Image: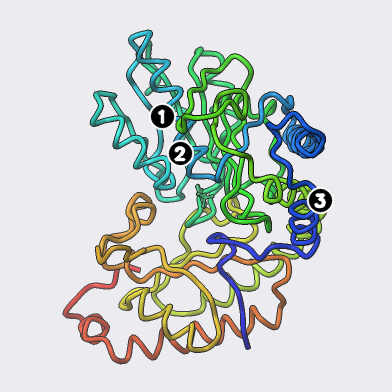
Amino acid sequence: MKIYADHAATTKLTERAAQVYLETAREFYGNPSSLHTAGQRAKEVLEDCRGQIAAMLGAAPREIYFTSGGSESDNQAIRSAAYAGKKKGKTKLISTAIEHHAVLHTLEKLEKEGFKVVLLPVGTQGIVDVKDVEAAIDDSTALVSVMFANNEIGTLQPVAEIGALCRARGVLFHTDAVQAVGHVPVNVKELSCDYLALSAHKFSGPKGVGALYCRTGAPLSPLIEGGAQERNRRAGTEDLPAIAAMTEALKESIAGMGAAAAVMRRLQDRLIEGLEKIPHCALNGDRVRRLPSNVSFCFEGIEGESLLLLLDEKGICASSGSACTSGSLDPSHVLLAIGRVHDVAHGSLRLTLGAENTEEEVDYLIASVTEVVSYLRNMSPVWRDLLEGKRQFIL
Ligand SMILES: *Cc1c(COP(=O)(O)O)cnc(C)c1O
């Protein structure tokens, strides 16, 4: 069996979006900045897409800026707010310990430039407390940035409450909604946000394209200099085929959202119940306030990387929280933030479902993970120590 259970990493382009991509590339090849007919026809498609995406988010068309994806949108929102704040002597940036690296690494860079960065805790359930945000805001605060839904453990943050709070206190608010858009209802008015980042490849659109919502009146400075595209905020010839395919994918996602969520909730329940039967494991993140697609577990006494490789041999595409990128063995900052100790955090597994996954696949996932965890534990000296009482079980 071949099972794709890594939808938080990326999703497969829909058939319709792929068609729209090709049709747009073939038909509307003109440069939207050109004054001739071919250019103006492309420009019309571009503005039509902007209008549709704006409408789907509750925004005005002029508040939507096309970018290369979630990372760029996060970078631009945060830097724009930070530099605008600095001009008014506001240098405090508030965020959470579980943000995506596109947010965290941008904040780290800004910290080196002299900004004061405060990363709020999220407790064992992986949800930031609005009271902590409130307590952190002061007269020197330039920006609050809190993600809508976490990419590793799926927890939904109280973004609408945080947005309302920021609006009342006159502080700019950015939300990285990359995991939310196309999956749960997202409306910029209800969120009272000034910036919102989205990425097409997380909702079955193409990779390398996304958008930044920036409320009219909120500061926005370009990251990329050059032409006057995107009202001077983002230079570079627009990737019209990708933008059109993203628009199509978002329409499809929103149209099918209710049905998809219902399917995934059932699969999620089944998967969590099945995996919970494995001894010495724990679900990561709040059981209820999470995306319907996300199932994240820690299994004591194993390494997430070995688990992933053995699952891959069984045809399963999954992910581990402890991204061993560039040879570093740092466990996931998200799992550490919810209180998992290093050893436990290393034994993590993230399965993220799509509406195409089936009950049969979920049963295969449960059987495979159960088998592989037990196989790895039987080989592990750490597991023997745990069984013999030389080490204490944590989970
Ligand atoms: C995937 C992701 C990003 C980055 O988006 P890209 O389009 O891949 O750059 C940012 N934030 C979150 C929460 C994500 O899941």
Quarter that holds the C terminus: bottom left
Residue drawn at point x = 23 percent, y = 72 percent: 392
Looking at the image, tell me whether mark 1 or mark 3 is earlier in sequence order.
3
Residue 353, picture quadrant: bottom right
Which quadrant is home to the N terminus? Answer: bottom right
Q: How is the image coloured?
A: rainbow
Residue 128 is labelled as 2
Label 3 CA crowd tier, 10 Å (few <14, some 14–19, many 20+): few
**Corner quadrant of residue 327:** bottom left
Question: Position of 74 compared to 393: left or right?
Answer: right
> For this view, does 19 lie left or right of residue 151?
right
The reply, left or right, for residue 131 in relation to residue 233 is left
Q: Earlier in the sequence, mark 2 or mark 3?
A: 3
Residue 132: which disc?
1
Q: Is residue 258 above or below residue 116?
A: below
Mark pair 1, 3: CA separation? 52 Å
Q: Nearer the viewer, residue 389 or 77?
A: 77
- Please indicate, yes or no, whether residue 258 appears anywhere in the rendered image: no
Q: Tell me the residue that label 3 is attached to.
A: 27
Q: CA distance from mark 1 to mark 2?
A: 7 Å
* Neighbours of disc 2 within 10 Å: few (<14), some (14-19), many (20+): many
Q: Is residue 95 above or below residue 200?
A: above
Q: Nearer the viewer, mark 2 or mark 3?
A: 3
Q: Secondary structure at mark 2?
A: loop
Q: Which residue is the extreme one toward the left?
A: 390
Q: Residue furthest top?
A: 88
Mark 1 CB within 8 Å of ligand 1: no
**Amino acid at dot 2:** Val
